[in-house]
Image (cartoon, helix red, strand yellow):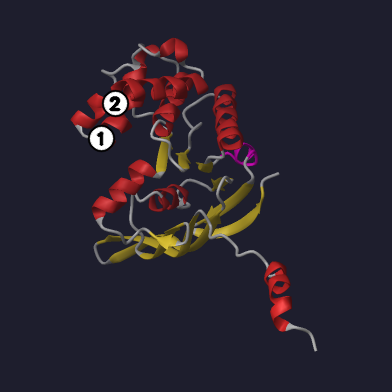
Amino acid sequence: MPDLLALEPTRRLMQPAPIAPAHLSTVALEKFYRKGDHKIPVLRGVEISIRRGEFLSIVGQSGSGKSTLLHVMGLLDSPSVGEVLLDGDRIDDLPQTTRDELRNRVFGFVFQFYHLLPELSVLENVLTPLMIRHSMLGYWKRRREFKAQAEEILEKVGLTHRLKHKPNELSGGEMQRAAIARSLVAKPEILLADEPTGNLDAGTGQEILGLLRNLNEQEGLTIVMVTHDENLARSAHRLVRLTEGRLEVLSDAA
């Protein structure tokens, strides 16, 4: 009869490694709004799972719910039903202050419209998330470190020659690059991009997409991108299609 104690180390080695939870996921997610007595559904039972370091595209027609899904996943909005999970832990039901902290620490956001502050330079715009995260005294003590951090990010997005320029002195592509740099300066784990090329011409849009792909490949940044352009979407690792708030297709983008 075999010695069970002797076999135990081998048995442990043969067991499969535990599967890590998804980096970001949703469970039975619903979102609806009320207009008088009527309930207007936007998301209908969406379940989605994004791996750490994955670049996922969400495609769909206008009104399909893709931007709402992105906003709910990034805690900019709350689900009506269902859950949002970060590394297996529910986050949508946390206290408001904790959700605010997660938005500032874990998530970076890029939108179709750049939302740069017109009175600030490119460098100052990029520094704003760090100003928000830290107290005035804390920021002031570390201002040189933060400035170097912002300049490093601006170098990555190709804007070292525009540090002192105001937004109205930039092209559309440069403004989006500045917005991406601003979203990255606080070193988020997940970048949520809502139509990041929607306000740009085709050539500039491809440049921005190339920048996002480089960040994903070189930095291991998890990226979720919403777009109506399927050609752009297919540059991601995986593509999810939303139709009238429902997950219709889940496939490799390639």
Q: Position of residue 51 (x, y in %)?
A: 57, 52
Q: Which region is colored magenta?
A: 229-235
Q: In the displayed structure, would residue 74 be above or below residue 231?
A: below
Task: State left or right for residue 80 relative to residue 226.
Answer: left
x 38%, y 34%: residue: 186
Instruction: Note whether residue 157 is visible.
Output: no
The circle drawn on residue 134 is 1
- Residues 91 and 6: in front is 6
Q: Position of residue 12 (x, y in %)?
A: 67, 71
Q: Residue furthest toward the right?
A: 1
Tag nearer the camera, 2 or 1: 2
Q: In the displayed structure, would residue 37 be above or below residue 126?
A: below
x 43%, y 63%: residue: 29
Q: Of helix, strand and loop, which one carries label 2?
A: loop
x 25%, y 28%: residue: 139
- Residues 142 and 43: in front is 142
Task: State left or right for residue 126 relative to residue 26.
Answer: left
- Name which residue type carries label 2: Arg
Q: Which comes before the other along the chain, label 2 or label 1?
A: 1
Instruction: Note whether residue 184 is visible.
Output: yes
Q: Position of residue 198 (x, y in %)?
A: 49, 32
Q: In the displayed structure, would residue 203 be above or below residue 223?
A: above
Residue behind mark 2 = 142
Q: Looking at the rendering, in which quadrant would you find the C terminus?
A: top right
- Name which residue type carries label 1: His
Q: Of helix, strand and loop, which one carries label 1?
A: loop
Could you say which quadrant of the image residue 83 lies in?
A: bottom left
Q: Are marks 2 and 1 in contact (CB under 8 Å)?
A: yes
x 34%, y 63%: residue: 80
Magenta-span inclusion, residue 133: no
